[in-house]
């Protein structure tokens, strides 16, 4: 490789983690983000970059514009899907890679990631660059080929649209959020439907990336009282003993569905996703579902779930299984066993119980 080629490769590798984090924030898919970064590498490799004074800025601009083009296509594709679309979860790694550290630096909750779908591609790019990557309006203007004043207005408009859509632009208290997620996990493990209902607000936003079906037992229990229509076409009913608050009837079907999912899995663990905790459902050691919640911002035990997302698509769970699945656990145990000087207590750092 020539000296110029080595310099170009070095410049790209120095920026790669940030570019991948940016593309993921834009597209909500790790696979799509990796494709975009690969396209950018090819263009960078083939371009005459002799006059480029700041490689990182050049690469950021190209990554943003490539992601905008890809997002326009993806949004048309996602709009035509009959089932819901959710961003691909990005779990926090035990031993963070450069990409993981870059993602944490560009911290943005999973719920906000979903609501970014409400924005047009240019709005999303401006918002992500400003809010997640601390880019100033002059830098954004250069990337989007607009004036700084126009970019300021775009970010303001995007922030307003997200607030209108219910985006919690500030993270809730992590301790309160963590306790609520643990209560959700415990209720799922105990199959406590009444306890689950008490965790939800009156009218939560409930979504999944695929049609979810209640178990035969849940359907049989539902048949004992009047059926209720819920999202996805399933019809279930509230247990007669559980009084419902205003707006909660539609929640009952989801409660039966997620308890059914938890019953089919043989383990539910708390894991870290996008810097906040969520629940991983594991079956025979592999992740079969991820449950993420948004809370109402209350700072005490009165906090409620205002949104719940269930990801069950095998394709979207591939990255999670590479990190938490049976093969990952076996690799960790092998490393522990091969190091007699290392205490097995280190397994406590792993986000799931390696001895379960």
Image (cartoon, grey):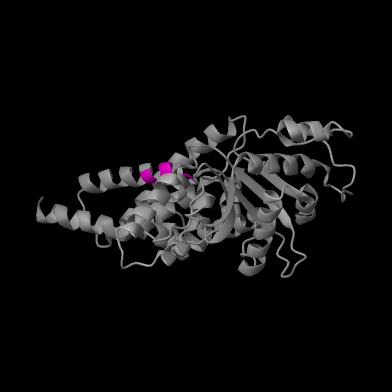
Give x and y (percent) for residue 11. 24, 58
Residue at screen point 68% across, 61% down:
180
- The answer to whether residue 116 shows anywhere in this view is no
Indicate left or right for 130 with 5 as reference: right
Residue at screen point 80% across, 31% down:
220
Indicate left or right for 103 with 251 as reference: left
- Residue 32 part of the magenta-drawn span: yes
Give x and y (percent) for residue 118. 61, 46
Return the residue nearer the eye: 170 or 310.
310
All told, the count of numbered labels is: 0
- The answer to whether residue 84 shows anywhere in this view is yes
Name above or below for residue 198 compared with residue 315: below
Indicate left or right for 69 with 302 as reference: left
- Residue 107 part of the magenta-drawn span: no
User: Which stretch is magenta?
Assistant: 29-34
Indicate left or right for 168 with 15 as reference: right
Which residue appears farthest toward the left when viewing the image? Answer: 2
Name above or below for residue 216 compared with residue 321: above
Residue at screen point 84% across, 41% down:
238
Give x and y (percent) for residue 12. 27, 55
Return the residue nearer the eye: 123 or 16.
16
Give x and y (percent) for residue 137. 47, 63
Return the residue nearer the eye: 180 or 111.
180
User: Which secondary structure is most common in the magenta stretch?
Assistant: helix
């Amino acid at each position: 490789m020539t000296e110029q080629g080595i310099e170009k490769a070095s410049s790209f590798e120095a920026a790669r983690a940030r570019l991948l984090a940016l593309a993921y924030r834009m597209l909500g898919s790790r696979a799509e983000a990796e494709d975009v970064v690969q396209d950018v590498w090819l263009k960078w490799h083939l371009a005459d970059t002799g006059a480029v004074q700041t490689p990182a800025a050049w690469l950021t601009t190209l990554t943003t514009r490539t992601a905008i083009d890809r997002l326009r296509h993806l949004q048309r594709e996602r709009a035509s899907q009959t089932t819901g679309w959710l961003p691909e979860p990005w779990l926090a790694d035990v031993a963070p890679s450069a990409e993981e550290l870059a993602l944490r630096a560009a911290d943005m909750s999973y719920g906000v990631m979903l609501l970014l779908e409400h924005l047009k591609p240019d709005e999303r790019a401006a918002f992500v660059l400003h809010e997640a990557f601390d880019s100033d309006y002059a830098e954004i203007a250069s990337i989007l080929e607009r004036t700084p004043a126009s970019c300021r207005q775009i970010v303001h408009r995007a922030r307003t649209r997200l607030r209108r859509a219910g985006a919690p632009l500030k993270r809730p208290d992590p301790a309160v959020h963590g306790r609520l997620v643990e209560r959700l996990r415990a209720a799922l493990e105990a199959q406590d439907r009444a306890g689950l209902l008490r965790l939800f607000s009156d009218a939560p936003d409930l979504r999944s990336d695929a049609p979810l079906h209640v178990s035969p037992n849940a359907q049989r229990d539902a048949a004992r009282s009047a059926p209720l229509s819920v999202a996805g076409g399933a019809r279930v009913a509230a247990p007669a003993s559980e009084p419902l608050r205003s707006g909660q009837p539609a929640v009952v079907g989801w409660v039966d569905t997620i308890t059914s999912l938890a019953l089919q899995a043989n383990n539910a663990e708390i894991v870290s996703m996008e810097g906040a905790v969520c629940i991983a459902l594991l079956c025979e050691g592999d992740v079969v579902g991820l449950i993420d919640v948004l809370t109402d911002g209350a700072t005490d035990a009165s906090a409620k779930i205002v949104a719940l997302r269930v990801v069950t698509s095998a394709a979207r769970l591939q990255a999670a299984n590479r990190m938490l699945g049976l093969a990952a656990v076996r690799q960790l145990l092998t490393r522990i066993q091969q190091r007699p000087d290392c205490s097995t207590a280190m397994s406590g750092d792993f986000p799931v119980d390696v001895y379960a």
